[in-house]
Image: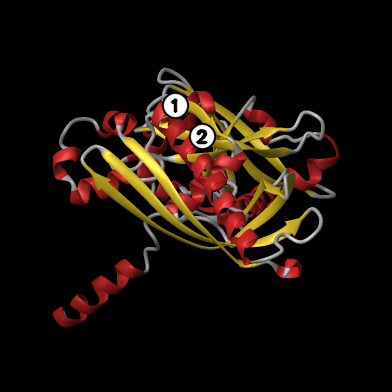
Amino acid sequence: MKRLLIILLPAALLLSGCWDELIFKDTQMVTMVGIEGDSEEVTVNYGFPAVTDSSLEISTIEAKGRTYGEARNDANERSSEVLDLSFMQILFLTEDAARYRVYDFLDNFFRIPRNRVIAHVMLTQGELKDYFAISGDYSKFLNSSESYSKMINTFHQYSLSTMYDLQQVCTILFDEGMDLSLPVIRINQESGKPELAGTGLFKGMEYTGEMLTVDEGRLLTMLKGEEGSILRMSYEVDVDGEKVPILLELVDNKQKINIDGEQAGIDLQIVVEAEEFAHGPVYKGEKQFNELEDQLGKLIEEDIDRLIGRLQEAGSDAIGIGRRVRAFHEDIWKKGNWNDTFADMEIDASVKLTMERSGILE
């Protein structure tokens, strides 16, 4: 009899169900979350699919609280169903909210095991509620997290900005050797459609308010080695005394960071393809071809130097040079706060460009 009880008691525990079980009909699948506010009050918007008589639409709940957790509790109390974030795909943070210690807004997401921490994170300009209720001809297309996810995939595929999910964001926030950078989107006033405004720079836990242009964002993805499958750059070059535009596509990118005292050098070896040339042949012979490579290499080098200057002005090591300093140059790392050390370092870029393919221009 005792042996039978020993077998049956553990089996009975297995029949009690999951400890965090939620009945599907009693839950609301949240696919988008937006946070705005400051250290004293937080406003959170939850977006979720709602079935009407004729279509599937996105409904929203707006909640307030002193913290994100309190705002979510407020939303649950006013909803007939439990908000389930295990389906969350997009997390919006307003630029104003990101200026505070941003992890304080995000901490609660990791306290509930069901929450989805691989949702993409973006910064927003303007009114947060506008991103949940797009008006005009784009309303049906954009009133879903799937559409935002497709937009994010485009950003990544074309190397327009650095892209991170919630788990990666929080990992970088606690990384003293690299600062966070996130895409910033805005609502186009003419079309009413969300678009990429640039790449926002963080310093430690807080958004600096400094935003890179889309072109600078492309270069940042290249320097970080996080470019997507396509990275195109457009430049104006001198050919036979005439300024002519040329479109390049990155084929390969190798880089080496050298640190000597408080000086750092970034050596890049870039292989590109000339995708488009306005008119005529790019080169008439090997000499002109080599001159064109040198000219393009210097133009990209100048752009990278300007980008590094902007990063240093913001005190934001979005490239991650600090990771190498921490690993191999302990004396520099221990000098003081890395963001301040990074801002004062002399950092120069050197670019060696090779045009491996020139398509119809050969």
Total marks drawn?
A: 2
Q: Is residue 265 above or below residue 288?
A: above
Per the image, the residue denoted by label 2 is 200
Q: Is residue 237 left or right of residue 108?
A: right
Per the image, the residue denoted by label 1 is 208
- Three-letter amino acid code of the residue under disc 2: Gly
Q: Is residue 21 left or right of residue 11?
A: right
Q: Secondary structure at mark 1?
A: strand
- Three-letter amino acid code of the residue under disc 1: Thr
Badge 1 local density, few (<14 within 10 Å), some, or many (20+)? Answer: some
Residue located at (49% from left, 42% from top): 304
x and y percentages locating residue 160 in the rendered image? 60, 47
Q: Are marks 1 and 2 in contact (CB under 8 Å)?
A: yes
For the residues labelled 1 and 2, the Cα–Cα distance comes to: 8 Å
Q: Which mark is residue 107?
A: none
Q: Is residue 19 visible?
A: yes
- Judging depth in this view, the residue of 60 and 236 nearest the camera is 236
